[in-house]
Image (tube, rainbow, N blue to C red):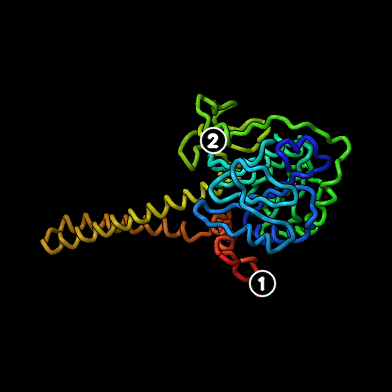
Amino acid sequence: MATDGARELEGHEIVVVGASAGGVEALRRLISEVPADFPGTIFVVLHLPTNAHSFLPKILERAGALPVHHAIDGAVPDRGAVYVAPPDVHLLLKRSGMQLQRGPTENGHRPAVDPLFRSAAEAFGSSVVGIVLSGVLDDGTNGLLSISSRGGLTAAQSPDDALYPSMPKSAIDNVPIDIVAPADEIGRALTRLAHHRTPGRDTEPGAVADYTERALEGNGALEMEGRPSRFTCPDCGGSLWDADPEESGKFRCRVGHSWTTLGLLEQQALTLEHALWTALRALSERADLARRMRDHAARAQHGYGERLFERQLEEYEAQADIVRQVLRKPEPLAYASEEQLDAVFVTAGVEAVEGPEEQPAPP
């Protein structure tokens, strides 16, 4: 695709795909159904740990007929190719090419799905197809809204086809979705969509409030609008503000960290668990110290001191037992361990999450 080729697009030839937990298998199935003569370009974000080394391009290239590459900052993408966001950078689309940026995390992720979707909507308007695949929480929903509001097409994996249905289900519940289908059927439909422009939806590209870029510009670029919420950012401790109307249901701090309501709730659960383990450690240490002081008082035949430290020991042990009981209870919204599942396979170069024929990709 030439640098100015976006103005000559006749169909929906910019395809952006977002996935999280369960996304490796969904992406393989989607890409496997896209033919070698596909006229558009596909851009993929899979949530990964920031320190991962991703084999996802090798995995997807072996699954289908298209060449697959990690995106390169400033490069102009080719038609008939797939570009994957590298770990620890957001992938953004501009009319001049791809842009990689190590901006603030969104829902704790970098790369994140929503920055890719928003930038595609701003740069290419109704030429975009946005697709949300398997994943937990609600990432991708706000980005799909941006695509839909600018005339692009939207698709979501059928929840009963997804290993983790939360992300596609959130999109279906909150966005006008054009296609809901299994991942492989969406892949088969992409060529048809690339040649088809929906009547009445030829919306021009338009500005999207994108704090991912503005966060690093300085000069007050992130002066917050609206009103502050009563919550603090789990990443930096700053005040969270209700996002602008186009990102309904999102919170954002002054330096650009972004959270959906579900993402914030999950991160608060993890923060609470960390605090509880810290409290348990502190109480256990205090109980051990009180035990030593009690025994020392007993050896010195100091009856008052022995009784005092015995009462403190009983109090600390009772408080520690309360914390242990809380930690034993499962936290239904703590998805962090599940969300790392695909990252393990991508980092290791394994082609599928399930199945006896999994083989590691070559290094």
Which residue is drawn at the image coordinates 57% and 58% (left, top)?
A: 343
Residue type (three-letter) at the residue carrying disc 2: Gly
Q: Quadrant of the N terminus?
A: top right
Q: Nearer the viewer, residue 198 or 223?
A: 198
Residue found farthest to the left: 300
Residue 60: which quarter of the image? bottom right
Can you identify the residue that label 1 sits on? 355
Q: Nearer the viewer, residue 237 or 204?
A: 204
* Mark 2 Cα shell of 10 Å, populated few (<14), some (14-19), many (≥20): many
Q: Position of residue 20 (x, y in %)?
A: 63, 54
- Residue 121 is tagged as none
Which residue is drawn at the image coordinates 58% and 36% (left, top)?
A: 212
Residue type (three-letter) at the residue carrying disc 1: Gly
Q: In terms of secondary structure, where does tag 1 sit?
A: loop
Residue 320 left/right relative to 240: left
Q: Choose the circle earlier in sequence order: 1 or 2.
A: 2
For the image, the number of numbered tags is 2
Task: Please say if 30 is above or below 104.
Answer: below
Q: Position of residue 24 (x, y in %)?
A: 65, 60
Can you identify the residue that label 2 sits on? 256
Q: Position of residue 42 (x, y in %)?
A: 72, 49
Q: In terms of secondary structure, where does tag 2 sit?
A: loop
Residue found farthest to the bottom: 356
* Mark 1 Cα shell of 10 Å, populated few (<14), some (14-19), many (≥20): few
